[in-house]
Amino acid sequence: YQRTFVNEVTFSGIGLHSGKKVNVKISPAPANTGIVFVRTDIKGSPSLKVSPQHLSKLFYSTNLCNDKVCINTVEHLMAALSAFGIDNAFIFIDSEEVPILDGSS
């Protein structure tokens, strides 16, 4: 039993540490995809599947990196996905940091 989104969700905000405006679109994903970040601001739109092996620079925030891309401050978004039992989603993001929004998940 796996869960994903029924419809796309979009939101924008400011990165807490970077101060940059960030646009995010979360789309449904097939079973067994996992949570996958896609950097739309980088040529070729490299992706990063959420995995403990990609944890990086755990100081003041939770960051994920692979050999092509990094995504910073993922902890609030990941908490919200976990709270709703979301197993599979594509997260399209146009910056290196998830926006803080109201600071909660």
Image (cartoon, rainbow, N blue to C red):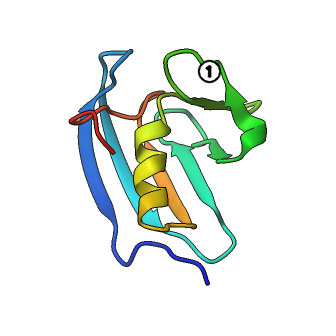
Q: Quadrant of the rendered structure where residue 102 is?
A: top left
Q: Quadrant of the rendered structure where residue 64 is?
A: top right
- Does residue 47 appear left or right of residue 98 in this picture? right
Asked if 57 appears above or below 8 in the picture, the reply is: above
Q: Nearer the viewer, residue 85 or 50?
A: 85
Residue that protrudes farthest toward the front in the picture = 83
Identified at 47% across, 52% down, the residue is: 91
Asked if 11 appears above or below 53 in the picture, the reply is: below
- Work out which quarter of the rendered image holds the N terminus and state it: bottom right
Identified at 69% across, 32% down, the residue is: 55
- Work out which quarter of the rendered image holds the C terminus and state it: top left
On the question of residue 69 being in view, the answer is: no
Residue that protrudes farthest toward the left in the picture = 102
Residue that protrudes farthest toward the bottom in the picture = 1
In the picture of the structure, the residue carrying the numbered disc 1 is: 58
x, y (%) of residue 60? 49, 17
